[in-house]
Amino acid sequence: MKQNVVVLFGSGAIGEAIARRVSAGKQLLLADYNEDNLKNVQKRLQEAGFNVDAIRADLSSRDSIQAVVKKAQSLGEIQHLINAAGVSPSQTTPEQVLKVDLYGTSVLIEEFGKVMAEGGSAVIISSQSGHRLPALGTEIDQQLATTPTEQLLDLDVLQPDVIKDSLAAYQYAKRQNVLRVAAESVKWQERGARINVISPGIIMTPLALDELNGPRGAGYKRMFESMVTKRPGTPDEIGELAEFLLSDKSAFITGTDILIDGGVTAQYWYGNVSEVRDSGKAN
């Protein structure tokens, strides 16, 4: 009997929290660009009793993603895909944000959609940032959802006259993730597989700490005060939602996006504009 394989792209705090909930008794394949992080997470999970293999991977490269697919297939049937990889707008250029978070995620969804086991499921970690944009219109939504992957970065809406900084690139990438998953879920259904998006708010991870200590940190802290929780979220809270979406308990859910942000996006659009909108610019 072939093993059931769980593939985790991006072995940060959120990805690890999800993998711990769905990988017991399965073969886990970790894929990450940072080799030190990859080795540390592999060691930690192996010591906790998980069966873990690892491969260095670059989400911005189709060849690299295909190598991960090939490695996963050699281990067994791919039951779950978790994509928690990406870059922060405080870490890099607009071009790199679009290359990794928009193009790379689209390639990942496409390539794994060809090989998922029947009954398999995936979760793509996006962001509340995608909910910060106003409506883009039917034509642009359709372009972002269905343009052939290798032509995505040539779209007019993704050029420098529209994408003026890394934060804008991040917002457009995260909006596109949601649209792309909805479109690609139709193809996944042909294999009897499901795929959904989670859009977290501020979750305490090393990436979030970069943001808190960066130029938008004050905005983040104001945002906490506007939230029902008065605090950021935790990776475990995302892990619990992802566990549900990957399980048979959510068999009737595919192609959708779940916003988990402590209510701050609702406040951004419908709350105290002078306070919440200013803080909302932080993410």
Image (tube, helix red, strand yellow):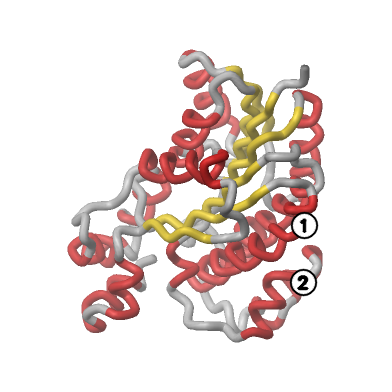
The local secondary structure at tag 2 comes to loop
Q: What numbered label is drawn on residue 283?
A: none
Residue 189 located left or right of residue 54: right
- Residue density around tag 2, few if under 14, some if 14–19, many if 20 or more, within 10 Å: some
Q: Residue at x 57, y 77 (%)?
A: 163
Vertical position of residue 62 compared to residue 236: above or below: below
Out of 7 and 190, give the one closest to the viewer. 190
Res. 9 image quadrant? top right
Res. 234 image quadrant? top left
The local secondary structure at tag 1 comes to helix
x, y percent for residue 151:
80, 70
Q: Residue at x 55, y 39 (%)?
A: 247
Q: Residue at x 28, y 71 (%)?
A: 279
**Could you give the CA–CA distance between mark 1 and mark 2, rounded to whole angstroms?**
14 Å
Tag 2: amino acid: Thr
**Looking at the rendering, in which quadrant would you find the N terminus?**
top right
Res. 29 image quadrant? top right
Out of 136 and 77, give the one closest to the viewer. 77
x, y percent for residue 61:
75, 50
Q: Residue at x 45, y 41 (%)?
A: 14
Write down the residue under mark 2.
Answer: 147
**Looking at the rendering, in which quadrant would you find the C terminus?**
bottom left
